[in-house]
Image (cartoon, rainbow, N blue to C red):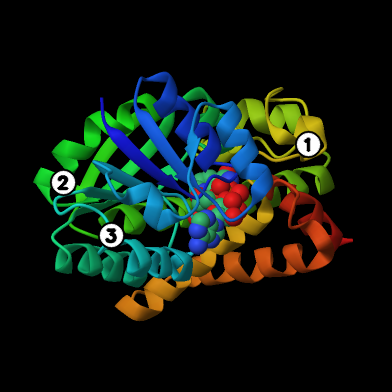
Amino acid sequence: MASIAFIGLGNMGNPMAANLVKAGHTVLGFDLVTENLETATQNGVTVMASAAAAVKDADVVITMLPAGKHVLSVYADIAAKAPKGTLFIDSSTIDVDSARKAHAIASEHGLLSIDAPVSGGVGGAEAGTLTFMAGGSADAFAKASPILEPMAGRVVHCGDGGAGQAAKICNNMILGISMIAVGEAFVLAEKLGLSHQALYDVASTSSGQCWSLTTYCPVPGPVPTSPANRGYKPGFAAALMLKDLKLAQEAAQSAGAATPLGAEATQLYTLFNAMGQESTDFSGIINFLRGKQS
Ligand code: NAD
């Protein structure tokens, strides 16, 4: 069993750390928020006074932080304080350029590193069924796989440093665009007098089939477990969708890729968030689309 330092014990980090404790690892945790530290203690995590104290004797360091600037600042603080050869796993969703900088900091200090963002949300973090998308060397990935296992349904090695973040933002750009497409189709169906169920029955078994329709259907009824059936309570909040779409746009500009639908989806989610819908599930954008047509 490993000694694991876990930095960032928020909505995702706390349940992930709890699953590592359940698997028998020793987990030393740190966060800036007292309430999160109290939850961590209840979950069997040993709370430390600082990130530096948590990593001092660690075999593995996991970070689960809001954005690239937080990851780079924490890495700059702790990279020299962890033992040489320690494996650093960053599971935050951050921009590809910052992910590559984080790998460079780790490498300069003789550490192994992977970027390993996740999909599956808080539910997946609690159930230990997250999908991890990993970027880094084969050696680092081989060492990371058994550590990720208690938190994961699936772990995919996507390529070198930054490839995990690239996979995450490309996937979520598809998701943001496809949710708008499905929402628009339901709004058009309503105007044409076609029932939600009839559109669902046809499109779910035809060429319009996609996850946004068959798992996360944005109207109540056809898929009883989708957020539309519980007042669009997240799930995956609109603020996080906007964050990921913006990361995809930044990456597209930096790499010179044309992503016109990604740009349009970013614009629409910006407007939806600006209407005070940050905490609404992202599938609630159908209500914004309806409003635009009336
Ligand atoms: P969160 O805000 O609940 O947790 C982030 C934690 O980091 C907070 O508790 C904060 O206090 C802590 N933190 C910030 N700076 C710190 C520092 N210097 N030292 C120690 N702790 C620090 O966010 P979350 O929902 O847990 O998301 C974490 C990451 O996972 C984000 O990058 C997010 O985009 C990604 N993600 C979230 C979800 C989701 O559904 N919530 C799904 C997939 C990916």
Tag 2: amino acid: Ala
State the CA–CA distance, disc 2 to disc 3. Answer: 19 Å
The residue that label 2 is drawn on is 140
Image side of residue 39 versus residue 293, left or right: left
Q: Is residue 64 above or below residue 209?
A: below
Rounded to the nearest angstrom, the CA distance separating label 2 from label 1 is 53 Å
Q: Nearer the viewer, residue 1 or 270?
A: 1
Quadrant of the snapshot with the C terminus: bottom right
In the rendered view, would you say 274 is above or below 277? below
Neighbourhood count class around disc 2 (C-alpha, 10 Å): few under 14, some 14–19, many 20 upward: many
Which mark is on residue 141?
Answer: none
Query: How many residues crowd around disc 3 within 10 Å: few (fewer than 14), some, or many (20 or more)?
Result: some
Q: Which mark is residue 194?
A: 1
Which residue is disc 3 drawn over?
Answer: 81
How far across and how far down the image is residue 283, in percent? Answer: 68, 46
Q: Nearer the viewer, residue 278 or 114?
A: 114
Q: Earlier in the sequence, mark 2 or mark 3?
A: 3
